[in-house]
Image (cartoon, helix red, strand yellow):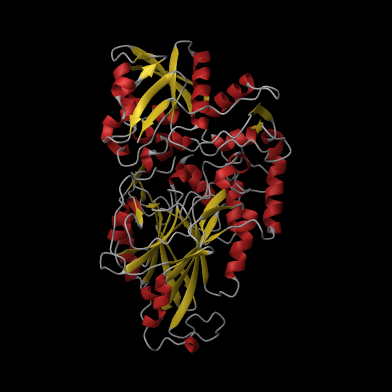
Protein backbone atom coordinates (compact mmCIF):
# COMPACT_ATOMS: atom_id res chain seq x y z
CA UNK A 1 0.00 0.00 0.00
CA UNK A 2 2.30 2.84 1.07
CA UNK A 3 5.86 3.58 0.15
CA UNK A 4 8.24 2.94 3.03
CA UNK A 5 9.53 5.81 5.17
CA UNK A 6 13.27 6.66 5.07
CA UNK A 7 15.57 4.63 7.26
CA UNK A 8 17.40 6.56 9.94
CA UNK A 9 20.77 5.07 9.16
CA UNK A 10 22.96 5.69 6.14
CA UNK A 11 25.39 3.24 4.65
CA UNK A 12 28.67 4.47 3.22
CA UNK A 13 30.36 2.52 0.51
CA UNK A 14 33.46 2.74 -1.60
CA UNK A 15 32.90 4.80 -4.70
CA UNK A 16 34.44 3.91 -7.99
CA UNK A 17 32.84 6.62 -10.08
CA UNK A 18 31.59 10.12 -9.46
CA UNK A 19 28.54 11.80 -10.88
CA UNK A 20 28.52 15.18 -12.52
CA UNK A 21 25.44 17.02 -11.25
CA UNK A 22 23.72 19.52 -13.47
CA UNK A 23 20.38 21.28 -13.29
CA UNK A 24 19.22 19.28 -16.29
CA UNK A 25 20.05 15.84 -14.91
CA UNK A 26 22.68 13.60 -13.41
CA UNK A 27 25.37 12.06 -15.59
CA UNK A 28 27.49 9.29 -14.15
CA UNK A 29 31.23 9.50 -14.39
CA UNK A 30 31.05 6.01 -15.84
CA UNK A 31 30.21 7.78 -19.06
CA UNK A 32 33.59 9.47 -18.87
CA UNK A 33 35.21 6.07 -18.70
CA UNK A 34 34.23 5.22 -22.25
CA UNK A 35 37.89 5.58 -23.14
CA UNK A 36 38.43 2.42 -21.10
CA UNK A 37 36.68 0.35 -23.77
CA UNK A 38 38.92 -1.94 -25.88
CA UNK A 39 40.82 -0.20 -28.61
CA UNK A 40 38.60 -1.65 -31.30
CA UNK A 41 35.71 0.46 -30.09
CA UNK A 42 35.80 3.38 -32.47
CA UNK A 43 33.18 5.78 -33.67
CA UNK A 44 33.26 4.02 -37.01
CA UNK A 45 32.20 0.83 -35.29
CA UNK A 46 28.97 2.42 -34.08
CA UNK A 47 29.84 3.09 -30.43
CA UNK A 48 27.72 6.13 -29.71
CA UNK A 49 26.83 6.43 -33.39
CA UNK A 50 23.05 6.21 -33.63
CA UNK A 51 22.79 6.37 -37.39
CA UNK A 52 25.17 3.59 -38.49
CA UNK A 53 23.64 1.01 -40.78
CA UNK A 54 26.33 -1.68 -40.32
CA UNK A 55 26.79 -2.66 -36.68
CA UNK A 56 30.28 -2.75 -35.25
CA UNK A 57 31.43 -4.40 -32.06
CA UNK A 58 29.82 -1.93 -29.68
CA UNK A 59 26.23 -0.80 -29.80
CA UNK A 60 24.69 1.80 -27.52
CA UNK A 61 21.25 0.74 -26.33
CA UNK A 62 18.97 3.39 -24.83
CA UNK A 63 17.00 2.29 -21.76
CA UNK A 64 14.21 4.69 -20.81
CA UNK A 65 12.57 3.89 -17.49
CA UNK A 66 10.11 5.18 -14.92
CA UNK A 67 8.25 3.78 -11.93
CA UNK A 68 5.31 4.27 -9.56
CA UNK A 69 3.01 6.02 -12.02
CA UNK A 70 -0.03 5.05 -9.91
CA UNK A 71 -2.47 5.91 -12.66
CA UNK A 72 -1.58 9.62 -12.68
CA UNK A 73 -2.69 10.38 -16.21
CA UNK A 74 -3.44 14.03 -15.55
CA UNK A 75 -0.74 16.27 -14.03
CA UNK A 76 -0.66 15.56 -10.28
CA UNK A 77 -1.46 18.52 -8.05
CA UNK A 78 0.38 20.16 -5.18
CA UNK A 79 3.68 18.72 -4.01
CA UNK A 80 2.82 15.47 -5.81
CA UNK A 81 3.29 17.36 -9.07
CA UNK A 82 6.65 18.97 -8.37
CA UNK A 83 10.28 17.91 -8.16
CA UNK A 84 13.19 19.57 -6.40
CA UNK A 85 16.08 20.59 -8.62
CA UNK A 86 19.59 21.34 -7.37
CA UNK A 87 21.05 24.49 -8.93
CA UNK A 88 24.73 25.04 -9.83
CA UNK A 89 25.14 27.49 -6.94
CA UNK A 90 23.91 24.91 -4.42
CA UNK A 91 20.41 26.31 -3.99
CA UNK A 92 17.27 24.39 -4.95
CA UNK A 93 14.09 25.21 -6.80
CA UNK A 94 10.88 23.31 -7.47
CA UNK A 95 9.70 22.45 -10.96
CA UNK A 96 6.15 21.49 -11.95
CA UNK A 97 6.24 18.02 -13.47
CA UNK A 98 4.16 15.07 -14.61
CA UNK A 99 1.13 14.18 -16.71
CA UNK A 100 1.09 11.52 -19.44
CA UNK A 101 0.44 14.10 -22.16
CA UNK A 102 3.88 15.51 -21.33
CA UNK A 103 5.51 12.18 -20.48
CA UNK A 104 4.62 10.88 -23.94
CA UNK A 105 6.14 13.93 -25.60
CA UNK A 106 9.36 13.66 -23.58
CA UNK A 107 9.78 9.92 -24.19
CA UNK A 108 9.09 10.24 -27.90
CA UNK A 109 11.58 13.08 -28.20
CA UNK A 110 14.19 11.10 -26.25
CA UNK A 111 13.82 8.13 -28.59
CA UNK A 112 14.48 10.15 -31.73
CA UNK A 113 17.64 8.96 -33.42
CA UNK A 114 17.94 5.93 -31.16
CA UNK A 115 17.13 2.85 -33.21
CA UNK A 116 18.06 0.66 -30.24
CA UNK A 117 15.69 1.92 -27.56
CA UNK A 118 13.81 0.07 -24.81
CA UNK A 119 11.24 1.49 -22.38
CA UNK A 120 10.87 -0.33 -19.06
CA UNK A 121 9.13 0.33 -15.75
CA UNK A 122 9.70 -0.58 -12.12
CA UNK A 123 6.16 -1.43 -11.00
CA UNK A 124 3.14 0.28 -9.43
CA UNK A 125 1.93 1.51 -12.77
CA UNK A 126 -1.59 1.19 -11.36
CA UNK A 127 -3.23 1.11 -7.94
CA UNK A 128 -3.84 4.00 -5.55
CA UNK A 129 -4.82 5.86 -8.71
CA UNK A 130 -6.78 9.10 -9.12
CA UNK A 131 -10.44 8.78 -10.01
CA UNK A 132 -9.88 9.15 -13.76
CA UNK A 133 -8.11 5.78 -13.76
CA UNK A 134 -9.21 4.17 -10.48
CA UNK A 135 -12.90 4.52 -11.21
CA UNK A 136 -12.40 2.25 -14.23
CA UNK A 137 -10.12 -0.27 -12.50
CA UNK A 138 -7.09 1.32 -14.20
CA UNK A 139 -8.03 0.38 -17.74
CA UNK A 140 -7.26 3.98 -18.85
CA UNK A 141 -3.70 3.71 -17.49
CA UNK A 142 -2.99 0.42 -19.23
CA UNK A 143 -4.31 1.96 -22.43
CA UNK A 144 -2.01 4.96 -21.93
CA UNK A 145 1.01 2.72 -21.25
CA UNK A 146 0.31 0.89 -24.49
CA UNK A 147 0.37 4.22 -26.31
CA UNK A 148 3.62 5.12 -24.51
CA UNK A 149 5.17 2.02 -26.12
CA UNK A 150 6.15 0.56 -22.78
CA UNK A 151 8.06 -2.66 -23.49
CA UNK A 152 8.11 -4.34 -20.07
CA UNK A 153 7.47 -3.73 -16.38
CA UNK A 154 7.91 -5.48 -13.08
CA UNK A 155 4.86 -5.89 -10.86
CA UNK A 156 4.59 -3.61 -7.85
CA UNK A 157 2.74 -4.22 -4.61
CA UNK A 158 -0.15 -2.02 -5.78
CA UNK A 159 -0.81 -4.27 -8.74
CA UNK A 160 -2.14 -6.66 -6.10
CA UNK A 161 -4.63 -4.20 -4.59
CA UNK A 162 -7.48 -6.01 -6.34
CA UNK A 163 -5.89 -9.46 -6.33
CA UNK A 164 -4.14 -11.80 -8.74
CA UNK A 165 -7.18 -12.31 -10.99
CA UNK A 166 -7.48 -8.58 -11.62
CA UNK A 167 -3.75 -8.36 -12.37
CA UNK A 168 -4.18 -11.18 -14.89
CA UNK A 169 -7.05 -9.23 -16.47
CA UNK A 170 -4.86 -6.15 -16.82
CA UNK A 171 -2.31 -8.33 -18.60
CA UNK A 172 -4.63 -10.39 -20.78
CA UNK A 173 -7.66 -8.15 -21.25
CA UNK A 174 -11.38 -8.71 -20.84
CA UNK A 175 -14.15 -6.70 -19.22
CA UNK A 176 -14.33 -6.28 -15.47
CA UNK A 177 -16.06 -9.30 -13.88
CA UNK A 178 -18.46 -7.15 -11.84
CA UNK A 179 -18.82 -3.83 -13.65
CA UNK A 180 -18.50 -5.17 -17.17
CA UNK A 181 -17.27 -3.13 -20.13
CA UNK A 182 -17.01 0.63 -19.79
CA UNK A 183 -17.10 1.33 -23.52
CA UNK A 184 -18.35 -0.43 -26.61
CA UNK A 185 -14.92 -1.98 -27.05
CA UNK A 186 -13.56 -4.95 -25.11
CA UNK A 187 -10.57 -4.06 -22.93
CA UNK A 188 -7.59 -5.66 -24.69
CA UNK A 189 -5.11 -5.61 -21.81
CA UNK A 190 -1.44 -4.70 -21.77
CA UNK A 191 0.70 -4.89 -24.91
CA UNK A 192 3.73 -5.29 -22.65
CA UNK A 193 4.56 -8.16 -20.25
CA UNK A 194 4.18 -7.83 -16.50
CA UNK A 195 7.03 -9.77 -14.85
CA UNK A 196 6.55 -11.59 -11.53
CA UNK A 197 9.63 -13.77 -11.07
CA UNK A 198 9.36 -13.95 -7.27
CA UNK A 199 5.55 -14.08 -6.97
CA UNK A 200 4.51 -17.74 -6.99
CA UNK A 201 1.24 -19.60 -6.91
CA UNK A 202 1.37 -21.35 -3.53
CA UNK A 203 0.00 -24.58 -4.99
CA UNK A 204 1.97 -24.89 -8.23
CA UNK A 205 5.07 -22.98 -7.05
CA UNK A 206 5.23 -21.39 -10.48
CA UNK A 207 5.50 -17.65 -11.16
CA UNK A 208 2.12 -15.94 -11.40
CA UNK A 209 3.12 -14.34 -14.72
CA UNK A 210 6.31 -14.40 -16.80
CA UNK A 211 9.51 -14.22 -14.71
CA UNK A 212 11.61 -12.60 -17.44
CA UNK A 213 11.53 -11.22 -20.97
CA UNK A 214 14.24 -10.81 -23.61
CA UNK A 215 14.51 -7.81 -25.93
CA UNK A 216 16.18 -8.56 -29.27
CA UNK A 217 17.26 -6.43 -32.21
CA UNK A 218 19.80 -7.28 -34.90
CA UNK A 219 21.78 -9.65 -32.73
CA UNK A 220 21.57 -7.53 -29.57
CA UNK A 221 19.88 -9.39 -26.69
CA UNK A 222 19.04 -7.92 -23.27
CA UNK A 223 17.12 -9.86 -20.65
CA UNK A 224 14.81 -8.28 -18.09
CA UNK A 225 13.94 -9.97 -14.79
CA UNK A 226 11.04 -8.48 -12.81
CA UNK A 227 10.50 -8.82 -9.05
CA UNK A 228 8.41 -7.08 -6.44
CA UNK A 229 9.33 -6.54 -2.84
CA UNK A 230 9.27 -9.69 -0.73
CA UNK A 231 7.36 -7.84 1.98
CA UNK A 232 4.31 -7.17 -0.22
CA UNK A 233 1.97 -9.25 2.01
CA UNK A 234 2.68 -6.84 4.87
CA UNK A 235 1.54 -3.78 2.96
CA UNK A 236 -1.47 -4.90 0.94
CA UNK A 237 -4.72 -6.46 2.06
CA UNK A 238 -4.62 -10.16 2.81
CA UNK A 239 -7.31 -10.79 0.20
CA UNK A 240 -5.13 -9.21 -2.50
CA UNK A 241 -2.30 -11.73 -2.04
CA UNK A 242 -4.34 -14.78 -1.07
CA UNK A 243 -2.81 -17.96 -2.47
CA UNK A 244 0.48 -16.27 -3.38
CA UNK A 245 4.04 -16.64 -2.07
CA UNK A 246 6.61 -13.84 -2.32
CA UNK A 247 10.20 -15.08 -2.54
CA UNK A 248 13.51 -13.38 -1.75
CA UNK A 249 14.41 -10.77 -4.37
CA UNK A 250 18.15 -11.53 -4.57
CA UNK A 251 17.78 -15.31 -4.73
CA UNK A 252 15.11 -15.01 -7.42
CA UNK A 253 17.07 -12.60 -9.60
CA UNK A 254 20.19 -14.77 -9.32
CA UNK A 255 18.19 -17.87 -10.27
CA UNK A 256 16.82 -16.35 -13.46
CA UNK A 257 20.08 -14.60 -14.30
CA UNK A 258 21.63 -18.09 -14.44
CA UNK A 259 18.76 -19.30 -16.62
CA UNK A 260 19.21 -16.39 -19.02
CA UNK A 261 22.95 -17.01 -19.16
CA UNK A 262 22.29 -20.63 -20.15
CA UNK A 263 20.12 -19.32 -22.97
CA UNK A 264 22.97 -17.17 -24.19
CA UNK A 265 21.61 -13.88 -22.83
CA UNK A 266 24.59 -12.21 -21.15
CA UNK A 267 23.20 -8.68 -20.76
CA UNK A 268 20.64 -8.51 -17.97
CA UNK A 269 18.62 -5.74 -16.29
CA UNK A 270 16.65 -6.33 -13.08
CA UNK A 271 13.37 -4.44 -12.67
CA UNK A 272 12.88 -4.36 -8.90
CA UNK A 273 9.88 -2.90 -7.13
CA UNK A 274 11.88 -2.06 -4.05
CA UNK A 275 13.80 1.11 -3.40
CA UNK A 276 16.05 3.24 -1.28
CA UNK A 277 16.57 6.62 0.28
CA UNK A 278 19.10 9.02 -1.25
CA UNK A 279 20.89 11.55 0.92
CA UNK A 280 19.15 14.39 -0.94
CA UNK A 281 15.60 14.95 -2.16
CA UNK A 282 16.85 16.74 -5.29
CA UNK A 283 16.38 14.56 -8.36
CA UNK A 284 19.76 15.62 -9.78
CA UNK A 285 21.73 15.09 -6.55
CA UNK A 286 25.25 13.74 -7.14
CA UNK A 287 24.59 10.36 -5.57
CA UNK A 288 28.19 9.19 -5.87
CA UNK A 289 29.80 12.30 -4.38
CA UNK A 290 32.15 11.45 -1.52
CA UNK A 291 31.48 12.52 2.03
CA UNK A 292 29.37 11.76 5.07
CA UNK A 293 25.75 10.90 4.35
CA UNK A 294 26.27 10.31 0.64
CA UNK A 295 24.75 7.68 -1.59
CA UNK A 296 21.59 5.65 -1.19
CA UNK A 297 20.50 3.61 1.81
CA UNK A 298 17.60 1.30 2.54
CA UNK A 299 16.55 -2.08 1.13
CA UNK A 300 17.78 -1.48 -2.41
CA UNK A 301 21.34 -0.84 -1.20
CA UNK A 302 21.51 -4.32 0.31
CA UNK A 303 19.90 -5.89 -2.75
CA UNK A 304 22.29 -4.10 -5.10
CA UNK A 305 25.34 -5.25 -3.13
CA UNK A 306 24.24 -8.88 -3.25
CA UNK A 307 22.61 -9.50 -6.64
CA UNK A 308 24.76 -11.53 -9.01
CA UNK A 309 27.40 -9.64 -11.03
CA UNK A 310 25.72 -11.18 -14.09
CA UNK A 311 23.09 -8.44 -13.73
CA UNK A 312 24.25 -5.22 -15.37
CA UNK A 313 21.79 -2.60 -14.06
CA UNK A 314 18.93 -2.24 -11.59
CA UNK A 315 15.78 -0.20 -12.29
CA UNK A 316 13.99 0.27 -8.98
CA UNK A 317 10.96 1.94 -7.37
CA UNK A 318 8.53 1.76 -4.45
CA UNK A 319 9.98 4.52 -2.24
CA UNK A 320 9.02 7.30 -4.71
CA UNK A 321 12.53 8.73 -4.50
CA UNK A 322 14.81 9.86 -7.32
CA UNK A 323 18.37 8.62 -7.62
CA UNK A 324 21.00 7.57 -10.13
CA UNK A 325 23.75 5.80 -8.21
CA UNK A 326 26.51 3.28 -8.72
CA UNK A 327 26.67 0.54 -6.11
CA UNK A 328 29.44 -2.08 -6.31
CA UNK A 329 28.24 -5.59 -7.13
CA UNK A 330 29.60 -8.62 -5.21
CA UNK A 331 32.62 -8.66 -7.54
CA UNK A 332 33.39 -5.03 -6.70
CA UNK A 333 32.38 -3.69 -10.11
CA UNK A 334 30.25 -0.52 -10.21
CA UNK A 335 26.66 -1.13 -11.22
CA UNK A 336 23.97 1.43 -12.04
CA UNK A 337 20.93 1.67 -9.73
CA UNK A 338 18.17 4.10 -10.75
CA UNK A 339 14.75 5.34 -9.69
CA UNK A 340 12.60 8.05 -11.30
CA UNK A 341 10.58 9.29 -8.29
CA UNK A 342 6.85 8.72 -8.93
CA UNK A 343 3.66 9.88 -10.67
CA UNK A 344 5.38 10.32 -14.03
CA UNK A 345 7.34 13.37 -12.89
CA UNK A 346 10.69 12.01 -14.09
CA UNK A 347 12.07 9.48 -16.51
CA UNK A 348 15.54 7.93 -16.52
CA UNK A 349 17.66 7.76 -19.67
CA UNK A 350 20.39 5.12 -19.39
CA UNK A 351 22.87 4.16 -22.08
CA UNK A 352 23.93 0.51 -22.01
CA UNK A 353 26.87 -0.21 -24.28
CA UNK A 354 26.45 -3.71 -25.68
CA UNK A 355 29.58 -5.64 -26.67
CA UNK A 356 28.67 -7.85 -29.62
CA UNK A 357 31.82 -9.92 -29.13
CA UNK A 358 30.86 -11.00 -25.61
CA UNK A 359 27.10 -10.38 -25.62
CA UNK A 360 27.54 -8.43 -22.39
CA UNK A 361 27.28 -4.81 -21.29
CA UNK A 362 30.52 -2.83 -21.09
CA UNK A 363 29.95 -1.54 -17.57
CA UNK A 364 32.63 1.15 -17.74
CA UNK A 365 30.64 2.90 -20.46
CA UNK A 366 27.26 2.96 -18.73
CA UNK A 367 25.79 6.42 -18.25
CA UNK A 368 22.46 7.49 -16.82
CA UNK A 369 20.48 10.59 -15.97
CA UNK A 370 17.09 11.49 -14.55
CA UNK A 371 15.13 14.05 -16.55
CA UNK A 372 12.13 16.13 -15.55
CA UNK A 373 8.83 15.61 -17.34
CA UNK A 374 8.33 19.34 -17.68
CA UNK A 375 5.03 20.84 -18.72
CA UNK A 376 6.55 23.36 -21.12
CA UNK A 377 6.44 20.99 -24.09
CA UNK A 378 3.50 20.31 -26.42
CA UNK A 379 0.93 17.84 -25.13
CA UNK A 380 0.77 14.53 -26.99
CA UNK A 381 -2.56 14.73 -28.88
CA UNK A 382 -3.32 11.01 -28.57
CA UNK A 383 -2.97 11.23 -24.78
CA UNK A 384 -5.19 14.30 -24.67
CA UNK A 385 -7.85 12.40 -26.59
CA UNK A 386 -7.52 9.45 -24.22
CA UNK A 387 -7.90 11.65 -21.14
CA UNK A 388 -10.84 13.54 -22.62
CA UNK A 389 -12.63 10.30 -23.51
CA UNK A 390 -12.33 8.82 -20.02
CA UNK A 391 -13.03 12.19 -18.37
CA UNK A 392 -16.32 12.34 -20.22
CA UNK A 393 -17.32 9.12 -18.49
CA UNK A 394 -15.90 10.12 -15.09
CA UNK A 395 -17.02 13.77 -14.93
CA UNK A 396 -20.60 13.24 -13.68
CA UNK A 397 -19.17 11.43 -10.67
CA UNK A 398 -15.86 13.19 -10.16
CA UNK A 399 -16.95 16.83 -10.52
CA UNK A 400 -19.48 16.67 -7.70
CA UNK A 401 -18.61 19.06 -4.82
CA UNK A 402 -18.50 17.28 -1.44
CA UNK A 403 -16.93 19.93 0.81
CA UNK A 404 -15.00 23.15 1.23
CA UNK A 405 -11.57 24.03 2.70
CA UNK A 406 -10.04 27.40 3.56
CA UNK A 407 -6.49 26.43 2.61
CA UNK A 408 -4.28 23.56 1.51
CA UNK A 409 -4.73 20.49 3.71
CA UNK A 410 -1.43 18.69 3.20
CA UNK A 411 -0.41 15.11 3.85
CA UNK A 412 3.22 15.98 4.60
CA UNK A 413 4.84 15.72 8.00
CA UNK A 414 5.15 13.19 10.81
CA UNK A 415 1.66 14.22 11.83
CA UNK A 416 -0.14 15.88 8.94
CA UNK A 417 -3.17 18.17 8.79
CA UNK A 418 -4.82 15.83 6.30
CA UNK A 419 -4.04 12.83 8.49
CA UNK A 420 -5.79 14.53 11.40
CA UNK A 421 -8.80 15.38 9.23
CA UNK A 422 -9.14 11.80 7.95
CA UNK A 423 -8.81 10.34 11.45
CA UNK A 424 -11.49 12.76 12.67
CA UNK A 425 -13.72 11.73 9.76
CA UNK A 426 -13.36 8.07 10.68
CA UNK A 427 -14.03 8.79 14.34
CA UNK A 428 -17.19 10.72 13.49
CA UNK A 429 -18.34 8.01 11.10
CA UNK A 430 -17.51 5.32 13.66
CA UNK A 431 -19.76 7.03 16.19
CA UNK A 432 -22.67 6.79 13.76
CA UNK A 433 -22.17 3.02 13.88
CA UNK A 434 -21.45 2.83 17.60
CA UNK A 435 -21.75 5.87 19.86
CA UNK A 436 -19.14 4.36 22.19
CA UNK A 437 -16.32 4.73 19.59
CA UNK A 438 -13.37 6.34 21.41
CA UNK A 439 -10.67 7.07 18.83
CA UNK A 440 -9.51 6.48 15.26
CA UNK A 441 -6.14 5.56 13.78
CA UNK A 442 -5.11 6.05 10.14
CA UNK A 443 -2.01 4.70 8.39
CA UNK A 444 -0.04 7.46 6.63
CA UNK A 445 0.62 5.38 3.51
CA UNK A 446 -3.12 5.22 2.85
CA UNK A 447 -3.17 8.99 2.28
CA UNK A 448 -2.09 9.40 -1.33
CA UNK A 449 -2.37 13.14 -2.04
CA UNK A 450 -3.00 16.49 -0.38
CA UNK A 451 -6.18 18.52 -0.73
CA UNK A 452 -5.27 21.76 -2.47
CA UNK A 453 -7.21 25.00 -2.12
CA UNK A 454 -6.56 26.11 -5.69
CA UNK A 455 -9.11 24.78 -8.14
CA UNK A 456 -7.97 21.84 -10.22
CA UNK A 457 -10.76 22.40 -12.76
CA UNK A 458 -13.91 24.48 -13.02
CA UNK A 459 -15.10 23.86 -9.46
CA UNK A 460 -13.58 27.02 -7.97
CA UNK A 461 -10.99 27.59 -5.24
CA UNK A 462 -11.60 25.84 -1.95
CA UNK A 463 -14.06 23.32 -3.38
CA UNK A 464 -13.29 19.66 -2.70
CA UNK A 465 -14.64 17.43 -5.45
CA UNK A 466 -15.32 13.72 -5.21
CA UNK A 467 -12.46 13.14 -7.66
CA UNK A 468 -10.04 14.98 -5.35
CA UNK A 469 -11.19 12.99 -2.34
CA UNK A 470 -10.89 9.78 -4.35
CA UNK A 471 -7.27 10.65 -5.14
CA UNK A 472 -6.62 11.06 -1.41
CA UNK A 473 -8.20 7.72 -0.42
CA UNK A 474 -8.49 5.41 -3.43
CA UNK A 475 -8.22 1.98 -1.77
CA UNK A 476 -11.87 1.29 -0.90
CA UNK A 477 -10.90 0.06 2.56
CA UNK A 478 -13.84 -0.27 4.91
CA UNK A 479 -14.01 1.52 8.27
CA UNK A 480 -13.83 -1.16 10.95
CA UNK A 481 -14.63 -0.85 14.64
CA UNK A 482 -12.86 -3.14 17.13
CA UNK A 483 -12.41 -3.40 20.88
CA UNK A 484 -8.91 -3.19 22.36
CA UNK A 485 -7.60 -3.00 25.89
CA UNK A 486 -5.75 0.13 26.86
CA UNK A 487 -2.57 -1.94 26.96
CA UNK A 488 -3.15 -2.95 23.35
CA UNK A 489 -3.72 0.66 22.30
CA UNK A 490 -0.38 1.59 23.87
CA UNK A 491 1.31 -1.40 22.22
CA UNK A 492 -0.09 -0.43 18.81
CA UNK A 493 1.33 3.07 19.18
CA UNK A 494 4.71 1.60 20.10
CA UNK A 495 4.63 -0.58 16.99
CA UNK A 496 4.92 2.63 14.97
CA UNK A 497 8.60 2.74 15.92
CA UNK A 498 9.48 -0.85 16.81
CA UNK A 499 9.42 -4.32 15.29
CA UNK A 500 9.29 -4.15 11.51
CA UNK A 501 8.81 -0.37 11.73
CA UNK A 502 11.84 0.38 13.91
CA UNK A 503 14.21 1.33 11.08
CA UNK A 504 11.49 3.04 9.04
CA UNK A 505 8.79 4.37 11.40
CA UNK A 506 5.16 4.54 10.28
CA UNK A 507 3.47 7.18 12.41
CA UNK A 508 -0.27 6.66 12.62
CA UNK A 509 -2.50 9.69 12.15
CA UNK A 510 -4.73 10.12 15.21
CA UNK A 511 -8.17 11.52 15.91
CA UNK A 512 -8.97 14.52 18.08
CA UNK A 513 -8.64 13.87 21.81
CA UNK A 514 -5.71 11.44 21.55
CA UNK A 515 -2.33 12.98 22.40
CA UNK A 516 1.16 11.74 23.24
CA UNK A 517 4.86 12.55 22.99
CA UNK A 518 7.15 11.02 20.36
CA UNK A 519 10.76 11.30 21.56
CA UNK A 520 13.01 10.75 18.54
CA UNK A 521 16.14 11.05 20.67
CA UNK A 522 15.38 7.57 22.02
CA UNK A 523 15.36 4.22 20.24
CA UNK A 524 12.78 1.57 19.47
CA UNK A 525 9.49 1.43 21.34
CA UNK A 526 10.80 3.88 23.94
CA UNK A 527 10.31 6.65 21.38
CA UNK A 528 6.60 6.58 22.27
CA UNK A 529 6.53 8.00 25.80
CA UNK A 530 4.00 5.77 27.58
CA UNK A 531 3.18 8.18 30.42
CA UNK A 532 2.34 10.92 27.90
CA UNK A 533 -0.50 9.03 26.16
CA UNK A 534 -3.82 10.70 26.92
CA UNK A 535 -7.38 10.40 25.64
CA UNK A 536 -9.43 13.53 26.25
CA UNK A 537 -6.83 14.52 28.86
CA UNK A 538 -6.94 11.27 30.87
CA UNK A 539 -4.22 8.59 30.86
CA UNK A 540 -4.97 5.43 28.95
CA UNK A 541 -6.15 2.75 31.40
CA UNK A 542 -4.33 -0.50 30.49
CA UNK A 543 -7.22 -2.69 31.66
CA UNK A 544 -10.09 -0.65 30.22
CA UNK A 545 -11.74 -1.42 26.86
CA UNK A 546 -11.55 1.13 24.06
CA UNK A 547 -13.57 1.12 20.84
CA UNK A 548 -11.20 1.97 17.97
CA UNK A 549 -11.95 2.86 14.35
CA UNK A 550 -9.37 1.88 11.74
CA UNK A 551 -9.51 0.99 8.08
CA UNK A 552 -9.71 -2.67 7.09
CA UNK A 553 -6.03 -2.71 6.10
CA UNK A 554 -4.92 -1.82 9.63
CA UNK A 555 -7.61 -4.02 11.13
CA UNK A 556 -5.88 -6.91 9.41
CA UNK A 557 -2.56 -6.07 11.04
CA UNK A 558 -1.14 -4.35 7.95
CA UNK A 559 1.87 -2.03 7.86
CA UNK A 560 3.59 -3.83 10.73
CA UNK A 561 0.81 -3.37 13.32
CA UNK A 562 0.07 -6.94 14.46
CA UNK A 563 -1.73 -5.72 17.58
CA UNK A 564 -4.35 -3.95 15.45
CA UNK A 565 -5.14 -7.34 13.94
CA UNK A 566 -6.09 -8.70 17.40
CA UNK A 567 -9.18 -6.61 18.06
CA UNK A 568 -12.51 -8.13 19.06
CA UNK A 569 -16.20 -7.39 18.61
CA UNK A 570 -15.71 -6.36 14.98
CA UNK A 571 -18.19 -4.11 13.22
CA UNK A 572 -17.57 -3.37 9.53
CA UNK A 573 -18.88 -0.14 8.04
CA UNK A 574 -18.78 1.45 4.60
CA UNK A 575 -15.61 2.43 2.81
CA UNK A 576 -13.25 5.09 4.16
CA UNK A 577 -13.88 7.43 1.23
CA UNK A 578 -17.56 7.52 2.20
CA UNK A 579 -16.52 8.47 5.74
CA UNK A 580 -14.37 11.33 4.42
CA UNK A 581 -17.11 12.53 2.07
CA UNK A 582 -19.75 12.58 4.81
CA UNK A 583 -17.42 14.45 7.16
CA UNK A 584 -16.60 17.14 4.61
CA UNK A 585 -20.25 17.56 3.64
CA UNK A 586 -21.48 17.74 7.24
CA UNK A 587 -18.80 20.11 8.51
CA UNK A 588 -18.28 22.65 5.72
CA UNK A 589 -20.18 25.04 3.49
CA UNK A 590 -19.03 27.58 0.90
CA UNK A 591 -19.18 30.29 3.59
CA UNK A 592 -17.81 28.17 6.46
CA UNK A 593 -15.03 26.03 4.97
CA UNK A 594 -12.94 23.66 7.06
CA UNK A 595 -9.63 25.15 8.18
CA UNK A 596 -6.57 22.89 7.92
CA UNK A 597 -6.06 21.13 11.29
CA UNK A 598 -3.05 22.30 13.29
CA UNK A 599 -1.40 18.85 13.47
CA UNK A 600 -0.54 19.38 17.14
CA UNK A 601 -1.74 16.12 18.67
CA UNK A 602 1.70 14.50 18.70
CA UNK A 603 4.47 16.37 20.54
CA UNK A 604 7.71 15.58 18.79
CA UNK A 605 11.07 15.74 20.58
CA UNK A 606 14.11 15.71 18.31
Q: Which residue is at 55% across, 24% downward?
A: 579
Q: Is residue 565 above or below residue 52?
A: above
Q: Is residue 448 above or below residue 441?
A: below
Quarter of the rendering occupied by the N terminus: top left
The furthest residue to the front: 89
Q: Is residue 438 above or below residue 97?
A: above
Q: Quadrant of residue 519?
A: top left
Could you say where residue 198 lies in the image, as x and y percent from the top left?
Answer: 35, 52
One can see residue 153 in this view: yes
Quarter of the rendering occupied by the C terminus: top left
Depth check: give the residue in front, 372 or 407: 407
One can see residue 71 in this view: no
Determine whether, in the image, residue 496 is placed left or right of residue 152.
Answer: left
Q: Quadrant of residue 528?
A: top left
Determine whether, in the image, residue 516 is placed left or right of residue 404.
Answer: left
Could you say where residue 64 lies in the image, as x and y percent from the top left?
Answer: 51, 64
Determine whether, in the image, residue 358 is placed left or right of residue 407.
Answer: left
Amino acid sequence: MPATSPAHHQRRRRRTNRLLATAAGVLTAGALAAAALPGSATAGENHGNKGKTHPGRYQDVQLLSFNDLHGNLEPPSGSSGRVTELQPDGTTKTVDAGGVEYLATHLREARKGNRYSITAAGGDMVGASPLLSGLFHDEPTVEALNKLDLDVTSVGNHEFDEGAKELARLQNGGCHPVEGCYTDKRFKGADFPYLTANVLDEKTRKPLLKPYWVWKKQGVKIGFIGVTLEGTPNIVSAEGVKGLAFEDEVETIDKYAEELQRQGVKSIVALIHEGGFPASSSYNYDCDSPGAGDGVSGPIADIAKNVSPQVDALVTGHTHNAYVCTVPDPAGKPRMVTSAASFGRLYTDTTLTYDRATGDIARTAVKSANHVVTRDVPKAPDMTRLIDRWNTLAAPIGDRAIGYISGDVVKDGTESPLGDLIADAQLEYGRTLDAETDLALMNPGGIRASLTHAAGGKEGDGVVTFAEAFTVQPFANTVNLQDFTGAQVVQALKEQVSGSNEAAPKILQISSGLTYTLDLTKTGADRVVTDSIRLDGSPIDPSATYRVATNSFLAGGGDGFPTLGQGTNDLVGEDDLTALERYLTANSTPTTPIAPPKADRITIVR
